[in-house]
Image: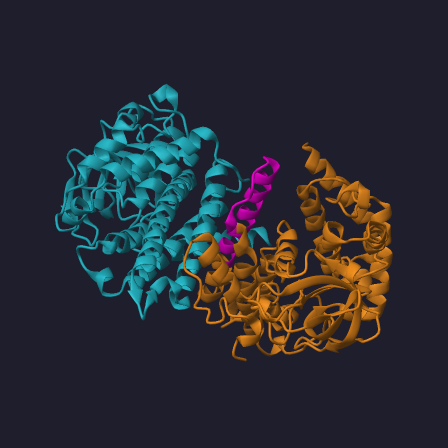
Amino acid sequence: MSELETYRQSARVFLDSMAPKYARPARSGNTVEQDLALGRQYMAARYDAGFAGINWSPEFGGQGLSNLHKIAFDAEEMQYGMPVGFFGISLGMPVPMMIHYGQDRDFVKERVTKALRGEEIWCQLFSEPSGGSDLAALRTKVEPDGNGWRMNGQKVWTSWAQYADYGVIVTRSDPTVAKHKGLTYFWVDMKAPGVEVRPIKLAGGDSHVNEVFFDNVRLEDEQRMGEVGGGFGLALHTLMIERYIATDSAGFGPHLDLFVKLAKETTLNGRPAIEDGRIRSAIARNHAMRAGLDSITRRAMLMMQAGMQPGPEGSLQKLVAVRSRQKLSELALDLQGTAALPFDEHAYVKEDWGTSWLNAPTGRIAGGSDEVLLNTIAEKVLGLPQDYRPDKGIPFNQIPA
Amino acid sequence: MSILYDEGQQAIATESRRVLDARMDKGRLLALLEQVGRIDQPFWDTAVEQGWTALAVPEVHGGLGLGLIELGLVAQAAGAATSGAPFLTVGYGAAQALLAAGQTGDLAALAAGEKLATVAFAEGSDPLPAGSAVTYADGKLHGTKPAVIGGLKADIAVVLARIDWQPVLVMADLSDVTRTAVPSFDNSRLYADLTFAGTPATVLAEGQTALDLARDVLARMAVVTAHEQVGGAEALLNIARDYSLTRKAFGQPIGAFQSIKHRIAELYGLIEVARANCIHAAASEGTDEFLIAAADARLSATEAYDTASRDCVQIHGGIGVTWEQGLHLHMRRARTLGIEQGNLLFWEDLLVDQLAGAAA
């Protein structure tokens, strides 16, 4: 057995031991606050068992293992439905950025340990009402204030900001230069005076994203990460950190087996729906697509094991998987007819077609919309021209609003 | 299971692509469309010279002892070039059937390209008829197999027939068979109705064993064809990309319009999914996963090639529908490859039968 497979097995042993207290069935009926409390306990247990910061340096409480070990553990953990959602972004981007760029190293070390143990949560304050896909159009501004800075503005779609202790943020420090060049990156204390968080209730009923307002919030210069004016580069670095993450060809919705099961149990025109050509076609096409994505993932793993860089086809995963999950979920509801109408707002997105359908649009927008991903593939992989950008090269404060 | 191509396999991919790039000629292929009964001889000579006919034949029978992975890579190059003869795939299928039945007498001649073999399973909309219209009795075949791939030139054929009402797989010598050419939209495939009237044939397998073997051979050929489809689709993607970078309209390259660039990016997605399925299927040869993997490869590759041929023509506008520009070579081939080795409907049904059984 390969070393990686041995590691995977040890992960399963750990996860099995945790499952009775923390896995999906144990969480059923929890409020968000109860679930968060349970999540913090699980994170502490995971840290103590040596499965935290798997691919991070031991200097920062990590295990010093490879990206592959991290992916292997995450793929196993995903199957249990542990309460880790609150900490995914925190440990995915902001905390690694602090390790890279945080000025006060002792402060960083303390924060990292607490974040790994689930005692503190970090959020990522990027998107704004005027800048989502077009991140560099953001307007939250910082102005020099003595030996530090003063910040005013608004962020939006910030996941878990209502529970966050700290955040990383991109701001506009110089509106007189082209939009990408006038940005500066900081960390911010989410409990500081002038920070206000307002949860946004989403279409699916949950409120994990927020608006965050900054009213004259004081930032010390040692909260700055990277150079003044270097914020866009750090923002790109943030988005590159999590390149090697566990993927899910089901688009983080139900497995195709569940659709096959539904088709066998449902009657259509007096016969099992599994015998209906339209249903069969949908199953077959989805299987072929998902099998292709799984195979892309396995090859990426093999390339990483061989010390090579995985190919750009990995960038297809979210684009292809989530939108087909949306359509398959629609079909699953259609297939059930009126039996699809009862809705349980607490149902699990990987087990329930209604929940999967209702939340699928979020997946097609968050983390790069379908359209932005298509642009990225067209431009970065295939070498096609950039879109027409009338604001290119123009100082930010001269761009027509 | 999945693999990364090793150095030898990468060399096969590069070399086959290089040789075909140097030797294939669009004008020659276009001329073949208007003639019945002709293949692109330079392509086939190249295939024999390069040892592609010997690739997947065991060494003891005069072959190179390689497998589906290597043959798939050659097929991918052949697909990119809209290869001028169908025997790479059907010759391989026939050889696999003969090998499985232990009737290896013709394998050396097939490997050397001295004999041409084909596979005659399909009858109309049924790629694998259990109750064939061709009957076998007393060592002889009677009846007609319609539109057999390569039927106009093949020397031998593996035929799915029936004895009474039991399926039987036989090997027939075609020297005295009546061949009626089927003029088609892709004539270098050499489609012909083969009419057997007491044609001598030897049994390879009978009953359920015959159907199982035929299905396995069909799945293997489908994986080769899927590679060919991926090669064709990828060639179209590159043609579409290059054209959209040079063709200008409204003051900019048309590739800067999202209606064009997103269409091409979507093609990339279809092709990479199909390619990954092809690699997985070829590497799963001989395992329990093979049939499902072959179906996945076949479904995604057919979708990729059909879509690429539709969209590439559309991106070209008027020039795309001209005879001389030749995109219709791919359009035609996308459809013939889509029909040969089992259509989408067949593979969808086969896949769901496998999945529904597995999930029971």
Q: Considering depth in this image, is A189 or A328 the residue closer to the camera?
A: A189
Percent from the top left, x then y, of residue A385?
Answer: 41, 60
- For the N terminus of chain B, the quadrant is top right
Q: Considering depth in this image, is B228 or B19 the residue closer to the camera?
A: B19
Identify the residue at horizontal 29%, vertical 28% (top origin): B50
| Chain that is coloured cyan in the picture | B
Identify the residue at horizontal 32%, vertical 61% (top origin): B310
Please name the predominant secondary structure of the magenta segment in the image: helix
Q: Residue furthest left?
A: B35
Percent from the top left, x then y, of residue B31?
Answer: 14, 48
Which range of residues does the magenta coloring cover? A286-313
**Residue A246 in sight from this viewpoint:** no
**Residue A380 in sight from this viewpoint:** yes
Q: Is residue B279 magenta?
A: no
- Where, by quadrant of the figure, is residue A398 drawn? bottom right
Q: Is residue B269 above or below residue A137?
A: above
- For the C terminus of chain B, the quadrant is bottom right
- Where, by quadrant of the figure, is residue A78 drawn? bottom right
Q: Considering depth in this image, is A143 or A6 the residue closer to the camera?
A: A143
Left or right: where A185 falls relative to B169: right
Chain A's colour?
Answer: orange
Percent from the top left, x then y, of residue B54?
Answer: 32, 27
Left or right: where B135 falls relative to A349: left
- Where, by quadrant of the figure, is residue B259 drawn? bottom left
Percent from the top left, x then y, of residue B74?
Answer: 35, 37
Q: Is residue A296 magenta?
A: yes
Left or right: where A396 falls relative to B68: right
Left or right: where B206 falls relative to B321: right
Identify the residue at horizontal 34%, vertical 64% (top origin): B254
